[in-house]
Image (cartoon, grey):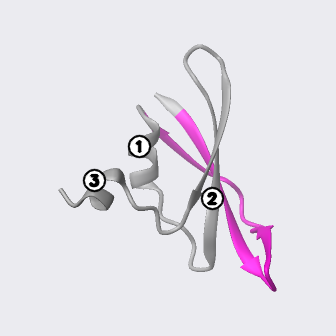
Amino acid sequence: MISYNFVSKQRLDGVLTKLDAEPVVIKALSLKKAINKFTPPTNCVEADIYWTSRKHNYSKKVITIPHVTRKQRKGK
């Protein structure tokens, strides 16, 4: 299992700021499954995701909230 750290951001006066809450740690086998398990706070606009892969490569991804999956975009 890989630990994914989600850091939520909110928009105040046109500027993105990180929320004061601690990062949410979710353990999952893939990034897709971790994003599905993540429940964002009410004011959340974006979330930064940090993780280390099995080959010990450090990675980061920024997603917008609400996250729309490829399946939802394509209409399957």
Callout in the foreground (3, 1): 3
Q: Secondary structure at mark 2?
A: strand
* Placement of 71 over or under 40, stated as above or below: above
Q: Nearer the viewer, residue 51 or 65?
A: 65
- Residue 4 image label: none
Image coords of residue 30 (percent x, y)? 42, 34
| Mark 3 neighbour class, 10 Å CA radius: few under 14, some 14 to 19, many 20 or more | few
Q: Say what amino acid the circle numbered 1 marks.
A: Lys
On residue 71, the disc is 3
Location of residue 55 by image quarter:
top right
Q: Badge 2 is on which residue?
A: 47
- Gap between marks 1 and 2 measured at Cα: 14 Å
Q: Position of residue 68 (x, y in %)?
A: 40, 61
Q: Position of residue 73 (x, y in %)?
A: 32, 60
Give the secondary structure at mark 1: helix
Q: Which residues are magenta?
A: 3-28
Q: Position of residue 4 (x, y in %)?
A: 57, 40
**Residue position marked by numbered label 1 in the rendering:** 32
